[in-house]
Image (cartoon, grey):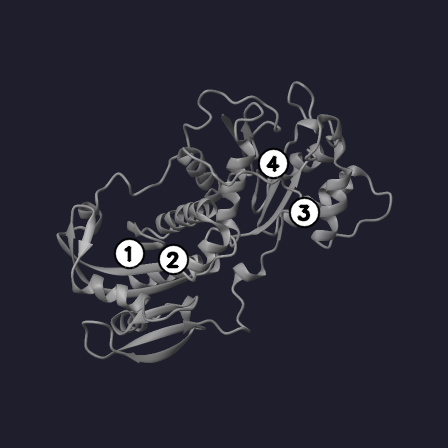
Amino acid sequence: MSWVRHNSQSKLPGAHPTPNTRDNLVFLSNSSKNLREWAGADRAILAIVFTDIVGSAAFGREVGDERMDEVRGDHFAHGKHLVEQYQGRLIKTIGDSLMVAFRSVDAALDFARRFLRNPGAPKIQIRAGIHVGSVDVKEDDIFGTNVNLANRVAGAFKGAEIWLSDDAKTDLDRQSPERFSHLKWSPHKVTPGGFPETTFWAMSEPGEAKTQAETYRAFTSKLPAVDSLLIGRDDELKFLDQAWANPKTNIVQIIAPGGTGKTALMDKWYKRHLDESTIFGWSFYSQGTQQDRQTSSDPFFAEILPFFHITIPQGASVWARAEAIAERLRHEKVLLILDGLEPLQESTGDVRDSAMKALLLELRTRNAGMVL
């Protein structure tokens, strides 16, 4: 499987990658350090998060063991991605739960809110409990009373919520990050097992205060259904994460023979980012025979223009359509997924469809999101 990352100086998609295509992409991970090195001491003050899938036993009975294993795998993979994004450390998984550590409560809450909004798999919800305190760091695990109390926070409620211990709430109040100013907190007197009575704090987000993520939309019904089980593609997923995070990356191509899992890789990756941008996905293959493949971009443009509420004069040129969409995508962060572009390409890889070629030329120069 080969990769091409395009910016404003790149050739149009269809060019073959050089052997050094990936050399300037650095994969970010904390996995090179052991937990002791990451924490900085044998005893450290950390914000500890426990997450759990709400109603997992009932859901598992409904979908069956095989499907539940797939859901759990997607959920854990997305959780690991978010942990790395917020510079935390995944300690371990326990059943359907994640045990995670961060260096601050605000980073832990950022992670928990994102994970609550998008748990990485459809039809599941999670809850998260956060506590902060000193822990013993031994090899790649943490131990102590504060770990136990963090677990009690997560176990004190049953719904899809985020709760903080009194210590974590006090620490957060001391920091007073502006991005949390709209959050509402409800105190609950509890006596967690093995601990004296204390206060846990339940977080809520006012309905009128929509987050940016809640304004994003997704059109993915035209993408093909794929087997959700994808194994051994961590490097490729990290490549895409790095490209997505780099504002200079405008277009990424995945180039490989048919049947090698390009669409499955794309499917796995974009579902991790549903709450980060608007997503518009289109496949230029129908899910039928080779003769049924689309040979024109007209159906694509007929769908994407109204999706973005773009109106152009009747009879406008293909370049006018392309420019109207490109202008919108220069100002709105959008992940534009173009699957199976081969029917619109020459055997050399050049795009022969005039409208699609014009759109890619425009987006190659500048766009606020990325084309995959």
Instruction: Determine whether label 3 and label 4 are within 8 Å by CB.
Output: no
Residue labelled with disc 2:
111
- Crowding near the residue tagged with mark 4, few <14, some 14–19, many ≥20 C-alpha atoms within 10 Å: many
- Crowding near the residue tagged with mark 2, few <14, some 14–19, many ≥20 C-alpha atoms within 10 Å: many
Residue labelled with disc 1:
102
Q: Is residue 362 above or below residue 160?
A: above
Q: How many marks?
A: 4
Q: Where on the picture, by quarter, is residue 366?
A: top right
Q: Alpha carbon of mark 1 to alpha carbon of mark 3: how far?
A: 40 Å
Instruction: Determine whether label 2 and label 1 are within 8 Å by CB.
Output: yes
> Relative to residue 228, is residue 181 drawn left or right?
left
| Number of the front mark, 1 or 4 | 1
Q: Looking at the image, is mark 4 or mark 2 earlier in the sequence?
A: 2
> Helix, strand, or loop for circle 2?
helix
Q: Where on the picture, by quarter, is residue 190?
A: bottom left
- Determine the residue positioned at 45% across, 59% down: 58
Q: Looking at the image, is mark 1 or mark 3 earlier in the sequence?
A: 1
| Number of the front mark, 2 or 3 | 2
Most extreme residue toward the right, as rendered?
Answer: 315
Q: Looking at the image, is mark 2 or mark 3 earlier in the sequence?
A: 2
Q: Looking at the image, is mark 2 or mark 1 earlier in the sequence?
A: 1
Q: Alpha carbon of mark 4 to alpha carbon of mark 2: how far?
A: 32 Å
Q: Amino acid at mark 1?
A: Phe
> Helix, strand, or loop for circle 3?
helix
Q: Amino acid at mark 2?
A: Phe
Q: Position of residue 149 (x, y in %)?
A: 23, 67
- Crowding near the residue tagged with mark 1, few <14, some 14–19, many ≥20 C-alpha atoms within 10 Å: many
> Helix, strand, or loop for circle 1?
strand
> Relative to residue 71, is residue 321 drawn left or right?
right
Q: Is residue 255 above or below residue 70?
A: above
